[in-house]
């Protein structure tokens, strides 16, 4: 049995599994070609990442900046027919800096694909300090 029963909650579960597995083919099926991924702040990973190529480059930068230590673990999902909210825990290291906090990823979903994602960090100041 799946962890989440609503189709959009199951989609989020597949998103996190594909991200963890670095499965670009599966991510491409879950994220719309023209999607936008909003990351707050002014750090090197911040901004509006528009389109699959830019979103995948953002995901790659998370790995590069943390020497592959960045990991996001899904905790819970709330879903409706048009949206999903994922509560997750992020962990990673950069040199001697350690990042560990929860965040909310608010997703807009159309035709079984993510068309927009907006990141809300538990501690925005710590997020900016870690990635800058």
Image: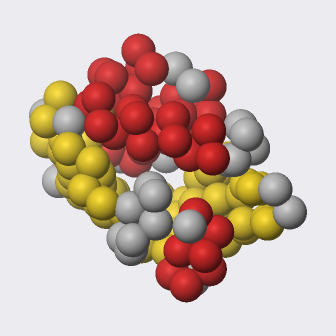
Q: Is residue 105 visible?
A: no
Residue 10 appears at what percent x and percent y? Answer: 42, 39
Image: 79 above or below 52: below
Q: In the shown orientation, is residue 2 left or right of residue 100?
A: left
Task: Write the residue at 86% across / 63% down.
Answer: 96
Depth order, front residue of 85/78: 85
Q: In the shown orientation, is residue 25 left or right of residue 83?
A: right
Quadrant in the picture for residue 88: bottom right
Quadrant in the picture for residue 31: top left
Task: Write the residue at 52% across / 20% down.
Answer: 23
Residue placed farthest to the top in the image?
A: 25
The colour scheme is secondary structure
Q: In the shown orientation, is residue 111 left or right of residue 64?
A: left
Task: Write the residue at 32% across / 44% down.
Answer: 8
Quadrant in the picture for residue 111: top left
Q: Is residue 123 visible?
A: yes
Depth order, front residue of 40/112: 40
Residue 15 appears at what percent x and percent y? Answer: 45, 37
Q: In the shown orientation, is residue 101 left or right of residue 29?
A: right
Depth order, front residue of 5/118: 118
Residue placed farthest to the right in the image?
A: 96
Task: Write the residue at 65% across / 59% down.
Answer: 90
Residue 29 appears at what percent x and percent y? Answer: 31, 22
């Amino acid at each position: 049995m799946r962890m989440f029963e609503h189709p959009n909650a199951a989609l989020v579960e597949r998103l996190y599994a594909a991200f963890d597995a670095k499965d670009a083919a599966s991510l491409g099926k879950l994220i719309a070609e023209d999607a936008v991924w909003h990351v707050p702040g002014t750090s090197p990973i911040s901004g509006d990442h528009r389109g699959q190529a830019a979103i995948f480059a953002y995901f790659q930068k998370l790995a590069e900046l943390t020497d592959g230590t960045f990991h996001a673990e899904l905790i819970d999902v709330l879903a409706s027919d048009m949206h999903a909210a994922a509560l997750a825990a992020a962990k990673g290291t950069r040199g001697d800096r350690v990042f560990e906090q929860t965040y909310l990823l608010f997703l807009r979903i159309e035709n079984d694909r993510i068309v927009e994602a907006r990141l809300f960090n538990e501690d925005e100041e710590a997020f900016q300090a870690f990635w800058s």
